[in-house]
């Protein structure tokens, strides 16, 4: 039977850590839907459409990966898309508490939906989207940490910021 994982996140922007997890997940699941949440509270740098475009470029060639936007409760979206599991990455022990809380909350909302955790490669263990944005804003190199399209998009965003007179 075909198994479909839903990999939710803000992906502002997608990093090579996320991509590493997706590549690992498609070895186990027949389909991985990368589900992009608006996450207005996080005040994302990129619009939903920009995030979707960057992810689509990054997963070109991974035929089991699909990219969609969702809003509202994750468990409702998982039910609607007939997902077999929510996929989340665990990079370090510091991720655990928050992930445990989310997994239990989601289970309380729908006892039939399992959360599956996978570990990205340790070389990406320190990356978060926020750290990437901060380094890029300050002119640091993010090559090798994000897909090429993301690197270009970050440069473009922050070039526009720098062009604004103080
Ligand atoms: N490689 C690199 N970075 C990773 C990573 C990996 N493998 N896995 C996680 N991260 C980063 C993310 O980029 C993010 O960085 P940021 O905080 O700098 O943006 C951070 O680690 C993890 O963020 P987190 O808070 O766990 O999640 P998220 O923002 O990616 O996604 C949702 C959270 C969207 C899944 C969650 O808010 C949700 O389900 N929302 C829908 C509403 C809902 O149902 N709420 C109830 C849930 S209990």
Image (cartoon, grey):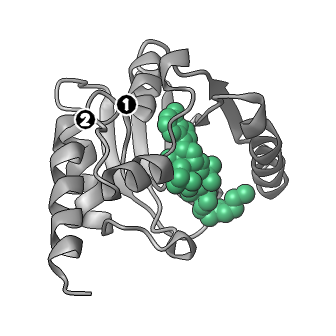
Q: Which is nearer the N-term, disc 1 or disc 2? A: 1
Q: Secondary structure at mark 1?
A: helix
In the image: residue 149, left or right of residue 16 = left
Quarter of the figure that contains the C terminus:
bottom left
Query: Residue drawn 27% across and 44% down?
Result: 55
In the image: residue 164, left or right of residue 137 = left
Q: Quadrant of residue 100?
A: top right
Q: Nearer the viewer, residue 56 or 163?
A: 163
Mark 1 lies within 8 Å of ligand 1 (Cβ measured): yes
Q: Residue 149 location, x and y as percent? A: 17, 43
Which residue is tagged 2? Answer: 147
Q: How busy is the neighbourhood of tag 2: few (under 14 within 10 Å), some, or many (20 plus)? A: many
Q: Residue 53 location, x and y as percent? A: 20, 53
Q: Residue furthest front?
A: 166
Which residue is tagged 1? Answer: 16
The answer to whether marks 1 and 2 mark residues whose Cβ atoms lie closer than 8 Å is yes
Q: Secondary structure at mark 2?
A: loop
Q: Residue 30 location, x and y as percent? A: 41, 21
Q: How busy is the neighbourhood of tag 1: few (under 14 within 10 Å), some, or many (20 plus)? A: many
Residue 113 in the image: above or below residue 92: below
Q: Residue furthest top?
A: 27
Q: Quadrant of residue 161?
A: bottom left
């Amino acid at each position: 039977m075909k198994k479909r994982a839903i990999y939710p996140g803000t992906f502002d922007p997608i990093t090579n850590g996320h991509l590493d997890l997706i590549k690992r997940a498609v070895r186990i699941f027949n389909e991985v839907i990368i589900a992009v949440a608006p996450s207005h509270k996080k005040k994302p740098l990129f619009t939903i459409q920009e995030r979707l475009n960057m992810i689509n470029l990054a997963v070109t060639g991974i035929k089991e990966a699909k990219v969609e936007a969702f809003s509202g409760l994750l468990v409702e979206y998982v039910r609607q898309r007939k997902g077999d599991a929510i996929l989340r990455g665990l990079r370090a022990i510091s991720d655990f508490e928050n992930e445990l809380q989310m997994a239990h909350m989601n289970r309380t909302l729908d006892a039939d939906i399992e959360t599956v955790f996978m570990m990205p490669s340790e070389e990406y263990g320190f990356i978060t989207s926020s750290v990437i944005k901060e380094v890029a804003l300050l002119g640091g190199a993010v090559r090798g940490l994000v897909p090429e399209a993301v690197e270009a998009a970050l440069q473009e965003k922050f070039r526009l910021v720098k062009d604004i007179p103080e």
